[in-house]
Amino acid sequence: MQFSHPLMHNNFTKADMNAAIRLFKQKGRILTQSKYVKKFENEWSKWLGVKYSVFVNSGSSANLLTMTVLRILYGKGEIILPPLTWVSDINSAIQNNFKPVFVDINPRNLCMSEEEIFKKVNKNTLAVFMTHVQGFNGLTSKLISFLKKRKILLIEDVCESHGATFNKRKLGTFGKISNFSFYYAHHMTTIEGGMICTNDKKIYEIAKILRSHGMARESNSSLFEKKIIKKYPKLSPKFIFLYSAYNFRNNEVGGVIGLNQLKSLDKNNKNRRKNFNLFLKFIDHSKYRTDFQLDGSCNYAFPVILKTKSLKSRNLFEETLLKNKIEFRRGSAGGGNQLRQPYLKKFVKNINLNNFKEVDHIHFFGYYIGNYPSLTRTKIKKICNILNHIKI
């Protein structure tokens, strides 16, 4: 059999399909958002360690609604963002009229450099939107203390880091709001889906309203609804739209798949961590960066970061992976340095890319390849053997 290594393998199981089939066979079944969505939200909150969770149709929607909540509650301001992240983190801030402020990354965890964050904070800073890239933790006690002292909000993007921890506490429990993605290739999947998590009841209720067209009745708070109905007596009680919003709901199929996937998440994460350690053991440290901050990490992919800055060597690297059918993505999270993307040109002007040397190295010489629970030691060793023999 010819060797191959896809980015993801078997992340949607027979047990998931059976769970969906059982739902379809139920009498009086409801497939739009209902009891299984609510049950998944509750079980996810227990697993993560937060009070409230809101299941939405994607991690990008979770980003957008999070920034919308901030605009509703806090108004304007600056959001400090990483240039190495998924495009929706940045767009969610821009589309809510926040000013994006970028800082370079820490090469040892691919997350925003805390020292660079400290330099960029000012009186207009509303929040730091920390992306925990590819399963690495981006938090430190110093950063958390700094933000708390200055009353700056911490928002966590944990879309690529389910189960990763800081000080033995799961990422996604430190911020005012945290976001998760259940895209097919991540630690667990609902095919498409995302989650907004918080310990703040007001944020929770606003997020639920925003998820469903901005309708007041979606808050599920009888006291709140009565207050709103009294305030707007000339409107139908079931159709009072408080905010400009759309439909970001998920459905019952996603809910039952999420519940089933959650059962295996801790076990699968344990295997991912074991795989990652084997990968770092076998890969050539002279050719590839391996000096990562591993405390609490839980990586759904193997980062392959070339030490060279030779484009010729990089091209040979890519040719070798293609020849051996090892699927890869260049640029890590979101394709590398977002500051180089055309969509940002009208929003961010006069950026000096020399101030973003670390993320630029990832942009041109950083990759990821698949790390999934079913990988064997033999296959990891084979992958590393192919990588190690590339003359770079």
Image: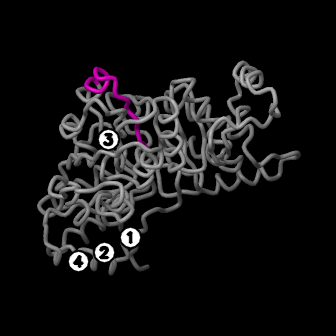
Label 3 with label 4: CB-CB less than 8 Å = no
* Disc 3 target residue: 80
Which of pointers 1 and 4 indicates the residue nearer the eye? Answer: 4
Instruction: Kindly identify which numbered label has been placed on residue 315.
Output: 4
Q: Which structural element holds mark 4? A: helix
Which mark identifies residue 372?
Answer: none
In the structure shown, which secondary structural element does the residue marked by tag 1 occupy?
loop
Question: What residue type is disc 1 on?
Answer: Glu
Query: Residue at coordinates 30% horizontally, 68% vertically from top-left?
Result: 382
Write down the residue under mark 1. 327
Q: Earlier in the sequence, mark 3 or mark 1?
A: 3
Q: Position of residue 114 (x, y in %)?
A: 22, 37
Q: What's the residue at 40%, 73% (across, down)?
A: 4
Could you tell me which quadrant the C terminus lies in? bottom left
Give yes or no for contact between labels 1 and 4 (Cβ–Cβ under 8 Å): no
Query: Residue 334 appears at what percent x and percent y?
Result: 37, 58
Q: Quadrant of the N terminus?
A: bottom left
Label pair 2/1, CB-CB below 8 angstroms: yes
Label 2: element kind: helix
Q: Decide if residue 351 is in sight here.
A: yes
First in sequence: mark 3 or mark 4? Answer: 3
Separation of disc 2 and disc 1 at Cα? 7 Å
Based on the displayed image, in which of its 4 quarters is residue 147 positioned? top left
Determine whether 334 is above or below 52 in the image: below
Q: Which residue is mark 2?
A: 321
Please identify, in this view, whether the residue under mark 3 or under mark 1 is nearer the observer.
3
